[in-house]
Image (cartoon, rainbow, N blue to C red):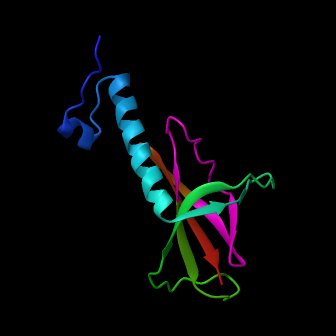
Amino acid sequence: MGVEMVSLPAFMRGNLRTAQERTIVEDSRAADALWRISLKSYDAVFMTTAGVWLAAQTVRLESDNSASSLRDTAGKGPIRKLIIYGVNSHPTVPDVDMQEGYVFILDKDEYHCIDIIKTFGETQGIWEAYG
């Protein structure tokens, strides 16, 4: 039994018939995600909802520099958003541990994870800070 090839249209759409096809696509997309993360990597430390600080994980940070008119309740300032990218389903790299409710400190600003998006090979966290 040889290795089954995945057609390019099926690969692009994520329209996969077998577990082997899904594994091929996940491995490929996880490798792509790891490469993108390595271009601008950051060792992030997250605090869980239970107050436990996790070991550093290699991720990629991207700030959302769009203007925001939303303000914190005390009028501290606009909401700032951050997108944190991590790897999942890579054959040799552990999955990033990032979940809604986690906290992350960057330049004295406290970011809270408000949403997680899991795709083939990559996890994206949407984070917000106020002030």
Quadrant of the rendered image containing residue 78: bottom right
x%, y% of residue 117?
Answer: 48, 52
**Residue 91 in the image: x percent, y percent?**
50, 34
Write the start and end of the magenta stretch as one range. Answer: 85-114
Residue at position x 49%, y 58% in the image: 38
Q: Position of residue 63 (x, y in %)?
A: 51, 74
Quarter of the view holding residue 108: bottom right
- Vertical position of residue 123 compared to residue 10: above or below: below
Residue at 54% in and 70% down: 82
Q: Is residue 95 magenta?
A: yes
Q: Residue furthest right?
A: 51
| Residue at left offset 38%, top offset 23% | 19
Q: Nearer the viewer, residue 57 or 49?
A: 57
Can you say which quadrant of the picture contains the C terminus? bottom right
In the rendered view, does 8 fall on the left or right side of 84?
Answer: left
Q: Quadrant of the N terminus?
A: top left
The mark total stands at 0
Residue furthest toward the top?
A: 1
State the residue in front, 121 or 17.
121
Q: Residue at x 42, y 45 (%)?
A: 31
The vertical placement of 29 against 109, above or below, is above
Give coordinates of residue 21: x percent, y percent. 32, 28
Magenta-span inclusion, residue 128 = no
